[in-house]
Amino acid sequence: MTTQQAHAIQVRGVEKAYKELQVLRGVDFTVTRGSIFALLGSNGAGKTTLVKILSTLLKADAGTVRVNGFDVATQAADVRESISLTGQFAAVDEILSGRENLVLVARLRHLKDPGRIADDLLARFSLTDAGARKVATYSGGMRRRLDIAMSLIGNPPIVFLDEPTTGLDPQARIEVWQAVKELAAQGTTVLLTTQYLDEAEQLADRIAILHEGRILVNGTLDELKQLLPPAKVEYVEKQPTLEDIFLTLVGADGKNGDAGKDPISARK
């Protein structure tokens, strides 16, 4: 396999400015096929602008980008055939049921047997029981999972998730994390933008930190940890984290764990 075949995404020297505001200042990175790549940065770092360039929605001022082997500037149609983009807010029709949303997209893509495709995706994202319900009744996590399921119709090899858990509650975030992990496990390349440190830590094979339009570091979590001095070994009494408390009370699957008990007596 050549280097180009091994890399689902190749970004070299990408720059973008809006009048006097320089948003991207020479961005370089590659994403290996079948991996989860997290682009981590605060608001205004340039994450969404970069995703728009990768998905052909915006033209770069300088640099080159290849997605699935295609140049985004000269082969935009081929790039669009290779990708799916899920934005910061779920793009689902609340009037329709979950299954009807999926069937609609499958028909728009002129795919055979849209009903079977919808049923398979509902099962894959644990939405079968809710498939006949209107999306207006869905929780935030269910809507986001449906949104991601819709983006997979047609089996695109590369998926862009632009801050997919923005505004979700802790349980819904965990549901989305599991869905993203399953995507990569089945061979899909995922480029994820996020401002949440724990999200990048939980999901990514590689993490790039984007700050003021530049990539500061790019590596695995272990590689990034080596940038800091080694940890000192000290005795520290382990206290439960807020996540531990939350999941103990509500249950890891969203159903009540010890919530039916008195929170204090449950520890006795």
Image (spheres, rainbow, N blue to C red):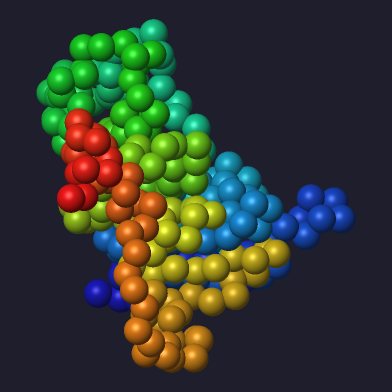
Where is 102 relative to 213, above or below? above
Extreme top residue here? Answer: 95
Q: Is residue 222 left or right of residue 98?
A: right
Image spot of residue 190 (x, y percent): 36, 54
Image spot of residue 183 (x, y percent): 25, 49
Residue 154 seen anywhere in this rendered image of the structure: no
Image-quadrant location for residue 101: top left
Where is 64 relative to 56, above or below? below
Where is 255 relative to 22, above or below? above
Image spot of residue 142 (x, y percent): 31, 29
Image-quadrant location for residue 24: bottom right
Q: Quadrant of the N terminus?
A: bottom left
Front residue of 71 and 124: 124
Which residue is located at x 52 percent, y 61 percent? Answer: 40
Image spot of residue 150 (x, y percent): 32, 30
Front residue of 143 and 240: 240
Which residue is located at x 31 percent, y 11 percent? Answer: 134
Residue 266 seen anywhere in this rendered image of the structure: yes
Extreme right residue here? Answer: 20
